[in-house]
Image (cartoon, rainbow, N blue to C red):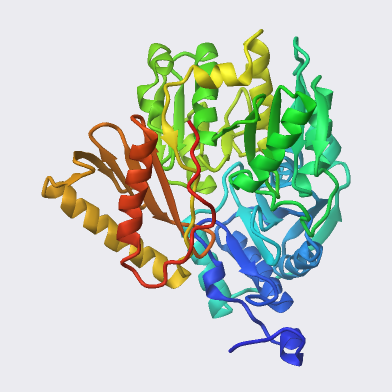
Amino acid sequence: MSVHYNTAEFETEIHIDPFGFREYDARWLYPDNINLRGVQLLGQALGTLLHREDIQPEIITGHDYRSYSMTIKQALIIGLMSAGVKVHDIGLCTTPAAYFAQFELDCPAVAMVTASHNENGWTGVKMGAHRPLTFGPELMNKLKEICMKGDTEIRQGGSYEYHDHIGRNYIADLVQGVALDRPLKVVTACGNGTAALYAPEALRRMGCEVIEQDCELDFTFPHVNPNPEDMAMLHRLRGAVLENGADIGFAFDGDGDRCGVVDETGEEIFADKMGVLLARYLSRHHPKAQFVVDVKSTELYKTDPVLQENEARTDYWITGHSYIKRRVKDIDALAGFEKSGHFFFNAPIGRGYDDGILSAITICQMLDEAKDKTMSDLKSSLQNTWSSPTMSPFCADEKKYDVVRDITQHFRKLYMAQEKILGRKIREIIDVNGVRVVLEDGTWGLIRASSNKPCLVVVVESPTSKQDMHDMFAELDKVLQKYDGIGEYDQKMEIAV
């Protein structure tokens, strides 16, 4: 039944769109796809799931800075308490601060109300029950089934406690034992999102000179959407870096678990290339280190001579913060790097969860150790490849997985028939997550379904030329355009070398 805003039904009936349950978190347009009674049901279902999975019924809650996030969280809390869960509310915070609170308060579960980098109008919940992990498909499907069947259990014992100290402790934990020998001037771009609560102060306390850009909290996001994969945010950051003669610029997403980088020349460094630089730095201190990266990431993790010399090993895995986080834990990797900017550091650096500010701090430490080298010097030491940003053409949620399955079969048939693309043989098909088509010279292209929005994801890279990168994109796009309902790309084909 459709329930519309500003009606009696919206206030009294439960409305929750099943398509809001994604692979590893939940996202809805509010109030179009979910109402507050639907959010209460979600809380009841989550509490019911904790009991049925024999997980201690205590949970951390927090919310990002959007006009409706606190209201959504309060409805969620009502549902959780009605299911017999003790709620530890840490208030307005970033997602990593909520993860930190799980350790600080010795609490197994988390429910962070955030739409992350999604545009205004979106809401959602990132959930976990075994720190530092977040839900994967198995628990998300169980939660969805409980919700959509209304199969919740009301229990006694629910309670509520508010904690106002977590933010202070979180910043102190980030900078503990960190000190720079070299003064760095950095720009922190927060897009008026929640990361502004912590990023400028944390970087100042570790010894950086900080220039703030869009660090006033404003849920209208008046300048750019806080998404470090969006070229608009990186271009705005570029201007501040050049104007202030900064050593580096950091762009944080709306809930603070991702970080984008612009070097001192104003050039963006895509997160997979930054991951290679960090892997070099970390593997010098931890020989034979194991890393995990997602299928959108550069081939340099396989071919970089410094990583080979340090005997570093890299595992390519499924895109998505929940998948990479779990893989890092399962194989005891030192770190995981996702092209979207989610970086995961295990001990002794971090606790295994993704944290954009910790990423920025680690990058500053790397630059500090490089002595007189600049960020662009470090970047130029990598082999040249021509890479696209992550591009996302619209594709409806109910169609996107079928489209990707068909396209995977198409390219696998070409591979089996030994047909060529751009006049070259297909060296490898990686279909752990969508389809990554790798040509014999290392040029590759990826098409996969987005895990949290109604769109596909397209990425291409070539180690040979800018033209090859464009030609590979054209090949993928030609296949995509055969399907009805494929919309415009969210951003243009820009190049990072």
Residue 484 located left or right of residue 421: right
- Position above or below: 343 against 154: above
- The quarter of the image holding the N terminus is bottom right
Residue visible at 51% across and 40% down in the picture: 339
**Foreground residue, 163 or 267?**
267
Residue visible at 57% across and 39% down in the picture: 341
In the image, farthest residue toward the left? 417
Q: Position of residue 295 (x, y in %)?
A: 40, 42
Q: Quadrant of residue 48?
A: bottom right
Count of labels shown?
0
**Foreground residue, 184 or 78?**
184
- Say whether residue 257 is visible: no
- Say whether residue 55 is visible: yes
Q: Position of residue 102 (x, y in %)?
A: 70, 43
Residue 312 located left or right of residue 201: left
**Foreground residue, 192 or 37?**
192
Residue 151 located left or right of residue 63: left
Q: Quadrant of residue 375?
A: top right
Q: Position of residue 444 (x, y in %)?
A: 33, 40
- Position above or below: 312 against 193: above
- Position above or below: 27 against 368: below
In the image, farthest residue toward the front? 467
Residue visible at 74% across and 42% down in the picture: 97
Q: Position of residue 277 (x, y in %)?
A: 53, 22
In the image, farthest residue toward the bottom? 8
Residue visible at 58% across and 56% down in the picture: 54
